Amino acid sequence: MQTEKTLSFTVDDIESGDRLDVYLTQKKDGSSRSFFQRLIDDGNVTVNGKTIKKPAYKISTGELITVELPEPVSIDVEPENIPLDFVYQDDDLAVINKPQGMVVHPAPGNYSGTLVNALLYHCKDLSGINSVLRPGIVHRLDKDTSGLIVIAKNDIAHVSLAEQIKQKSAHRTYLALVDGAFNVEGGTLETGYGRNPDDRLKMMAFPLQRTQTDPNLRVAKTDYKVLEQFCYQGNNYSLVQCDLHTGRTHQIRVHMAYIRHPVVGDAVYGKQPHRFKLNGQLLHAARLSFCHPKTGEQMTFEAELPDYFQRVLTILRQNSR
């Protein structure tokens, strides 16, 4: 049954084995694969009545796939004269050092004051692949995570940058101050990943083998390296470098909490209250590298730690025992 709000399809033999997101993109002209991936992530797609939240789910002959389309939102995103720290820009892209506290794109409750509002003021052109609410946005940073983010100014650049992130040829390196001391120099965290069943606003890491049996889980992978360790007023802290292989929502914050080293200042996954009088987690996107979508040039950018992060490190370095 097809209505303005619901799409239903039955899988044919020839379609069996296709990815769910690819299948839906082929079935609905004019809608992007990322559009259906968001619908799947948001729980708007069922297979034989069961909600599936894994875009890579392999469909089978005879399965009934139902898509609940969200109500269209009519909204004008207004340009706002908000200062931005442009690290680099040309006709195809911009690299911005986002401050802590800035939301990347408009969403319910945040239709102004976002990075997108600022971009619409400062940039003449932005890619339109991710709709009016997310023009130019190739990847995201959490509101209270600072650091480097790349913006696409046209669709060709957007496709290239998004593909580099997907194929892991683009590299993102973060610095985080976390609770606790490590007895290893570093390691790799590869887990299942999905919504916390007890709190849908939170993400959660699961044992990797769960991804084989739970279609709602995806794989998340983070490399981490311990750079410095501190003991301050009876508490241990560690400065770690994290390199992403995947880009799941809240990934570093969740992975660090998963191994019992939550990011300092994280009000969602960390310990509360905290003594450093912070406004958010000490997590900074410090390094970003990718190939320029037009020239093919390898580009690397770095952003220094913000003042509040450096202030805490100074306290720890001067007073650590």
Image (cartoon, rainbow, N blue to C red):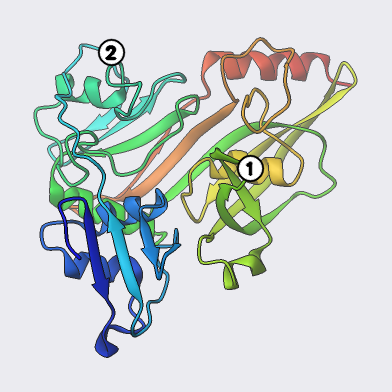
Residue 164 seen in render: yes
Considering every residue shown, the one lying at the far front of the view is: 1
Considering every residue shown, the one lying at the far bottom of the view is: 13
Query: What residue would you read off at disc 1?
Result: 198
207 relative to 162, above or below: below
Q: Circle 1: is it few (<14), some (14-19), or many (20+) Cα within 10 Å?
A: few
Query: What residue would you read off at disc 2?
Result: 83
Residue 297 seen in render: no
319 relative to 191, above or below: above
Dot 1: what SS? loop
Q: Quadrant of residue 59?
A: bottom left
Residue 136: x percent and y percent?
22, 38
320 relative to 95, above or below: above
- What's under tag 1, amino acid-wise? Asp
What's the residue at 40%, 71% (across, down)? 48
Q: Is residue 26 left or right of residue 164?
A: left
296 relative to 109, above or below: below
Dot 2: what SS? loop
Residue 265: x percent and y percent?
65, 22
- What's under tag 2, amino acid-wise? Pro
Residue 30: x percent and y percent?
11, 57
Front-most of 53 and 265? 53
Residue 308, numbered label: none
CA distance separating discs 1 and 2: 39 Å
What's the residue at 34%, 29% (across, down)? 104
Q: Circle 2: is it few (<14), some (14-19), or many (20+) Cα within 10 Å?
A: few
What's the residue at 25%, 89% (across, down)? 14
